Amino acid sequence: MSGKERDLTQGSILGHIRAVAIPAALSLLFVTLYNVTDTFYAGKISTEAQAGLGLGSQLFFIIIGTGVGFRIGVSAFVGNAIGAGDRQAAARAAAQAIGASVVVCALAMVAGFWGLPALARAVGGDNAYVDNAVTYMRLMLLSAPGFIVTYAMTGTLSAQGDTVTQERAQLAATLANVGLNPLFIWGIPGVFDGFGLNGIALSTILCQSGVLLFIGWSAFRSDVLRDIAWRDLLPRWGKQKDLMRNVIPACSTIYVTVLGGVIAQFFLRPYGADAVAAYGVGFRLQQLLLLPVIGLTTALLPLTAQNIGAEKQDRIREAVGLTAMAGCVFVALGAVVIWTMGEPLVRLFNDDDAVVAHAVMFLQILSFGLPFLVLIFVSQNLLQGLERPNWPLLIGVWRLGIGLALFGWLFTGPMGLEVRGVWLALLAGGVTGAVLAAIITLRVARGAGLNLLRPADQNH
């Protein structure tokens, strides 16, 4: 292999986890810092702007989630072909995925222009921050190729064990965003006026377009894609069936995450912009603390995909154990940070006492669910690597859909817990979702010849 690609079917599992997970975690760190930067500057504009950004970002994640779904589906499908030693099949799958992502991106941009504002008004009602969310999202649609097409190409790279390229691209984008945000928000006196909240969207358009160009250049120089012809990128519907069997459920799983944000914001709507802004700040900080876990479990997907293709189930079991144990250590450290530094961290983004109180409560309540999130992340990536994408979708539908709505109604309605009830509903959805994930994962893994409860030498 050449460049940054790795054969994950040979060598030390721990070494592969370090090599794949650290760049993946750093990449996610840069993405999260990117979002944290946006949240920080929106708070400097006003609480209304920060609430609008929070709602707009949650709904725009439908677009980002489409790209993430491509990344997950492509990584599993291409990784299986690589593990089986079929480079030609891997190249065909990767090319078809990239071609399909271009078509899907165009359709998403058109549909999003009308659909996202309608959804924002349905969720936010007549609150003033909804107008901010609508203009922000419509402008953000210009950045859609930087997410959907980019992530399809990133899936090809991660299937080959290359997460370094994405790390470097996101680092550059994050650094650029730190400078471009204030430039576009407030402008340059005597040169041009700032664009307010829309300046944050303009910064993202430029930064993600740069990421698209760099990832594309790297992907088409990788082992899998270097020899394809441009005509191979044209979607051939006969070759899309197996690929879409992975991509569509993966996209749907991400859409469920958006649904969870919509449901949470729906229950928060009666409590005003302070509660909505607190949810946005708390969610960003929670994601920041979860980055090591997400990076670790992201590495599990290509490890599983390549090794199941090579019929090396013992290596998968070892990887699951290592990532789960390390994940529990990281969330324990995250809980300590929440309970000792939660308020000062929140005040970095919004100094309004009401927002701070709600956000700190969010972090403290959700800290009890962190170990359960480790289990969910491990299960989702393992199942995706085994090419069983429908099961993570089912888990997500309960955790962030049916379960969250049920608990949200119970805690804010009959029990009258108001904002606290929304945070408790998120916790209850996560705990029950983790139990469901454990049951499903053990049974599906056993069916693939992978008994996670027995020693490695019995996995045959």
Image (cartoon, rainbow, N blue to C red):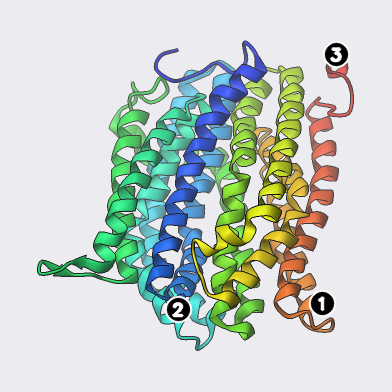
Q: Position of residue 61 (x, y in %)?
A: 50, 59
Q: Amino acid at mark 2?
A: Glu
Q: Secondary structure at mark 2?
A: helix
**Depth order, front residue of 106/26:** 26
Tag 3 residue: 457
Quadrant showing the C terminus: top right
Q: Earlier in the sequence, mark 1 or mark 3?
A: 1
- Residue in the picture at 31% in, 69% down: 198
Q: Residue furthest left?
A: 190
Is 354 displayed left or right of 57 in the figure? right
x%, y% of residue 447? Answer: 82, 32
In the rendered view, would you say 350 is above or below 163?
Answer: below
Q: CA distance from mark 1 to mark 3?
A: 47 Å
Please name the residue shown 51% across and 42% down the image: 28
Q: Which quarter of the figure has residue 377?
A: top right
Mark nearer the viewer, 2 or 3: 2
Q: Amino acid at mark 1?
A: Leu
To which residue does mark 1 refer? 410
Q: In this orientation, which residue lies closer to the viewer: 121 or 388?
A: 121
Q: Is residue 235 visible?
A: no
Numbered badge on residue 48: 2
